[in-house]
Amino acid sequence: MQKAVLLWGGVLALGLSAAAWAGPTAQGAPFHVSSCTTCIQQVPAVAGSASGAFLTVWKGASPVDSNGVSGRMFSGTGTPMGSDFLANKDLVQDQYDPAVARDGQGSFIVVWSEVVNGNSEIKGRRYGPTGAALGAPFKINQDQAGTPTIPADFNPAVAALKDGFIVTWMSILPAGNGFPGTTPQVLARKLGPTGAPVGNQVKINTGLVNGDRPDVCVDTSGKPVVVWTSVDGFPLFEANHKGVSLRQLTPAGALVGTAETVVAAPKAGSVHPAVSCGNGSTFVVVWHSDQSPAVDQTDILGQRFSRLGRPVGTPFRINTTVANQDRNPSIAHDAKGNFVVVWQAYLGSAKVSILGRRFNASAAALSPELEVFAGADNAMVPGNPDVAMIGTTGNFVVVWQDGAQSISGRRFTP
């Protein structure tokens, strides 16, 4: 069993101890998200509002659908505002990959992938500030005429624009009918405030893509920023190497520039990138990697970017505990430009926890590592954490998957 080692060099250099840092404070113990204690819940996502309310969504089983997308609203005090609801209306097809975002009016949009005609499409549905559905589910992706096979669209992500939403996802043309198939592509499409499409979907990537879920945020000027996992190729009978790429879009959802920007060259075994936009149209990308400045099997790394999409400084390491692996980061900014990163930490051969850390806009740490959820040896493995700001003073909520079939959450003040 590898022993965790704390790297306090940066703190000691300032003559400070961890106790001198003002860290986030938990508002109570972790809570169970779903109102169904016997249902399977996996892969949670969360979005918060200025009122402090938040909506959590997940995939799994419910009393009325064996494989759908469910959600539940919570008030600013963390009190449930009702029981679980089912986002999808089709109970025959399966639904996966939920994501959620909140607009400036406090309404939410939930997106997911849904099996249709043997492949999958991207669907969405809007909800009011209290979690009441605003209309029926709607289709987001376009099926291009003349394709040799039916496209498979999956792994959506969504962010709010000033006049609607931007949705990005993965798409492939599967092999069939003598057609060899295509490699994954990153697509995006703008939606209006009611969810109606605005223009056509666009292809974002110019290099090779792995197919994992992309991520997206919208900067203060209204420009979306999309990040995804890039690869160096698809060699037969051996693993490829993965990196991180990004591309900015215009507020209308059109491409900026002629090529993607490489955040991290494809050299790692896996990356799981996430992005969050801060003040002044700046943004931060985080990912896990075994490449420098990582010092362990996988560390959580970050890179700041200017409003022009140019790197600010060099990549920095976010975790301070050297564990076996730190993986699957999520990031969110508050109104002052500070940001919180949460991730899954393998702290030994049989212990996994959810950790976090808070930074200011210059990526200077404002806290030591935060223990969101303390895992126990040989217990159910927590994973897939997601974080969202709630309210206007830097409060935030973290949700995560407990083992194979439960979702928990916890609220924090800065």
Image (spheres, rainbow, N blue to C red):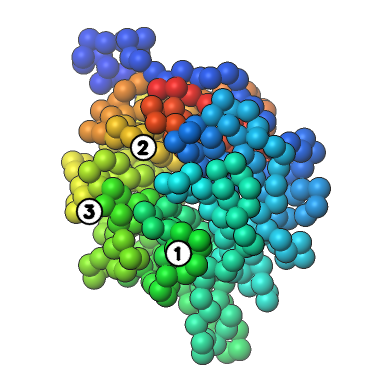
Position of residue 256 measured from the top left corner of the image (x, y, whole percent): 25, 65
In this figure, which residue is indicated by the disc labeled 2?
Answer: 333
At mark 1, the secondary structure is strand
The amino acid on which the numbered mark 1 sits, given as a three-letter code, is Leu
Position of residue 229 measured from the top left corner of the image (x, y, whole percent): 41, 57
Q: Earlier in the sequence, mark 1 or mark 2?
A: 1
Q: Is residue 318 visible?
A: yes
Quadrant of image for the N terminus: top right
Circles 3, 2 touching at the beta carbon (< 8 Å): no
Q: Earlier in the sequence, mark 3 or mark 1?
A: 1
Residue ID at (53%, 53%): 109
Residue ID at (63%, 72%): 119
Q: Is residue 215 visible?
A: no
The amino acid on which the numbered mark 2 sits, given as a three-letter code, is His
Q: Measure how far apart labels 1 and 2 are at the Cα level.
A: 23 Å
Q: Measure how far apart labels 3 and 2 are at the Cα level.
A: 17 Å
Residue 40 image label = none
In this figure, which residue is indicated by the disc labeled 3?
Answer: 309
Q: Nearer the viewer, mark 1 or mark 2?
A: 1
Position of residue 74 measured from the top left corner of the image (x, y, whole percent): 60, 34
User: Eyeballing the image, is 338 above or below 263?
Assistant: above
Position of residue 388 measured from the top left corner of the image (x, y, whole percent): 47, 37
Relative to 39, 283 lies left or right: left
Residue 191 image label = 1
The amino acid on which the numbered mark 3 sits, given as a three-letter code, is Gly
